Amino acid sequence: MDLIPSFSVDHTRIVPGIFTSRVDVIGEYRVTTYDVRLRKPNVEPAIDVAAMHSLEHLVATYLRNDPDWKDEVIYWGPMGCLTGFYLILKGNRPSEEIYEVILNAFKSVEEAEDVPGATPVNCGYCLMHNLPMAKWYAAKFVAYLTENQGKKEIFEYPKTERLVTDDGRDFYDS
C-alpha cells in the first residue's frame, strides 16, 4: 500500500503552524485539507481531550459564522493524535492566505463565556468540555502564530526523505 500523504510529513521536525496537507479534485471542485498544528508532535504533550473538544466547538462555530469564510468551510475537526486540527475548505489557497482567519478564530476563544453546542441535545458527549484549558491552548497558539508570523516553517511541511530503490520504488523502513 502507498503511504498516505500525512504520514510522509516528518513529525520529528514539524512545528506548530498552518500547513496544506492535501488538495483533492472532486468532480469539477477542488478542496484543500489544512493541518492546523498546535503542538509539536512527540515532544509536547497532546492537547487535553476535553479542551480539544471545546476548541473544536468554539473554532468551528467561529469559522461557520465568519462572513468571509462560512461558505468555504467543509469541515473542522481534531486530529487523532491530539496535536492539532484539520480544516477542509473549498478551493485551493496557500496556507498563508488562511493565517488571519485561523488567528482570529483562536483569538475569539479568549472572549468565549461558554462552549456553543455543549448540551445533551447538541453534542455527543457534552460533559467532556474544558473551557479554561481551551482558552489556555488558544492563547498559547495565538502568541506563537503572532511571534512567528511570516516564517516559512509555520507554513511548509518538513517532508521525510525516502530512499528510492534501483527500480524506482520508494523504500520504507517500517
Image (cartoon, rainbow, N blue to C red):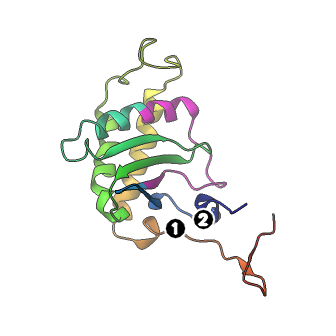
Residue in view at x 53 percent, y 62 percent: 15
- Viewer-proximal residue among 86 and 82: 86
Q: Which residues are magenta?
A: 33-56
Q: Position of residue 131 (x, y in %)?
A: 43, 28
Above or below: residue 121 compared with residue 55 = above
Q: Which residue in the protein does label 1 denote?
A: 157
For disc 1, the neighbor class at 10 Å (few under 14, some 14 to 19, many from 20) is many
Q: Given the image, on which type of amino acid does mark 1 rest?
A: Tyr
Q: Given the image, on which type of amino acid does mark 2 rest?
A: Val
Count of number-bearing discs: 2
Which image quadrant for residue 95?
bottom left
Query: Helix, strand, or loop for circle 2?
Result: loop
In the picture provided, is 79 more to the left or to the right than 102?
right
Identify the residue at the far front of this view: 27
Above or below: residue 162 compared with residue 133 = below
- Viewer-proximal residue among 137 and 3: 3
For disc 2, the neighbor class at 10 Å (few under 14, some 14 to 19, many from 20) is some
Magenta residue check for 163: no
- Viewer-proximal residue among 33 and 140: 33
